[in-house]
Amino acid sequence: MEINALTGEFARAPNEAAFLAHKQEQTRALLGFTLSFCTVFYLGFFATDLAALGWGPDTMALLAARIGVAVTAGACAWLAYRRRLPVRATRLAASLAEGVALACLMFISVLRPDEFHWHAMSLAIMLVVVYLYIPNRLRYAAGLAVAATLAFVVFAGQYGHMSGADKLTMGMLLVLVNTFGFLAARRFNQVSRAEFRSWSVLKHAAERDHLTGCFNRRYLHEQLMGVPDAGSLTVLLCDIDHFKHINDTHGHGDGDMVLRSFARILQAAIRDGVDSVVRYGGEEFLIVLPGTDLAGGLHLAERLRATFAGAALISQDGATALRATASFGVAAVDRTALASDAPLRRLIAAADALMYQAKRNGRDRIESLQLA
């Protein structure tokens, strides 16, 4: 998982998407909290408008602008808290709230032109919030921050009652805030993604069999044994025939090669993200097929059986073409009509019995059952 040196994001889109999905609940919570917090303070600072201008048309215009910011940010915060927003919607909400708040600050600055030095301080604080506290893509945050900074400098030059030295100092400080804000946000991106990368490695090691890359028994019991949704469920339990003979005749190196080859065939045939292949025992593999009926399970099992039986592997010494077969037990159930609260356990037990029946009946074959 390579990390982009400029943005701190993962270089490959699938890795970045996995990270964002993993962090989405935390991102939504942070977005909702930050926008709620900022809404309260943005409204609270109306007291400074009142103190500076007194009651009048300009003050009422500023109040309307602040209420507009509060409504926008409040609505985005509510959506973040109450709706399962996808990543794009979260970024849109963040960018919208930031853009409206920054535009309002420009409006405030123009109507209170004698206080541009204070407005510059307010903008600097807002830029820190944009870069670091409102979760958004770094390029979007930087784009909004730089655009707001340039607009503010233009307004300060046109409306501000400041000396040339003050304007230069203000501009340099705003450039400094943007620079360090960008660097800090990039560093945060890098650290959070490095942490996710380490977590992914540990998760993979905890859930996967190191030899075949299939899920292990721990994953089966912790992730797949829960009560599934209603619908069809099919499991395949398969075992390589005469595997001990392969190990005894050709050695464990060639035996491991056969195991890896069989695992690759199984993994290539399933639906990614839907079905699961588990190394159930030494040479036994379990395939869990949610939403698949018995006919679909039988079709897959026959395809796997024929593919594996027709595959020829060259032994490690390069002198022998290894061939092996496998026996399959296929069990299916309609979970809507099943009274048991552990359908997968029942199916595995049934498929196990069916697999041994296939071995007794000659191996390289399939036995199946529809559970009532």
Image (spheres, rainbow, N blue to C red):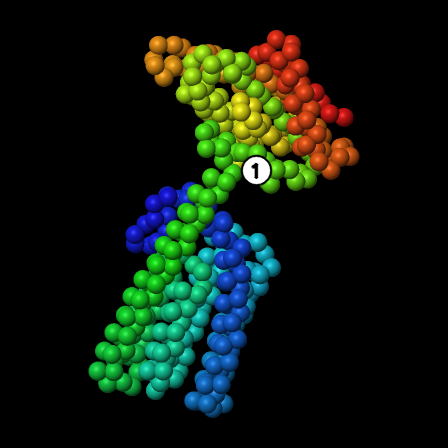
Q: Is residue 294 visible?
A: no
Label 1: few (<14), some (14–19) or many (≥20) C-alpha neighbours in 10 Å: some
Which residue is drawn at the image coordinates 33% and 82% (left, top)? 116
Percent from the top left, x then y, of residue 122?
39, 77
Q: Nearer the viewer, residue 53 or 180?
A: 180
Percent from the top left, x then y, of residue 52?
43, 89
Which residue is drawn at the image coordinates 71% and 23% (left, top)? 370
Q: Nearer the viewer, residue 88 or 130?
A: 130
| Residue at the left extreme of this rendering | 165
Q: Is residue 47 visible?
A: yes
Q: Is residue 164 left or right of residue 138?
A: left
Q: Is residue 320 left or right of residue 241?
A: left
- Determine the secondary structure under disc 1: helix
Which residue is drawn at the image coordinates 53% and 66% (left, top)? 33
- Is 316 above or below relative to 151? above
Percent from the top left, x then y, of residue 181?
34, 66
| Residue at the front extreme of this rendering | 248
Total of numbered circles in the picture?
1
Q: Quadrant of residue 228?
A: top right
User: In the rendered structure, which amino acid carries the disc numbered 1?
Assistant: Arg
Q: Quadrant of the N terminus?
A: top left
Percent from the top left, x then y, of residue 142?
35, 62
- Is 344 above or below relative to 265? below
Q: Quadrant of residue 221?
A: top right
- Is 334 above or below relative to 162? above
Which residue is drawn at the image coordinates 51% and 16% (left, top)? 243
Q: Quadrant of the C terminus?
A: top right
- Is 189 above or below relative to 119? above
Q: Which residue is mark 1?
A: 218
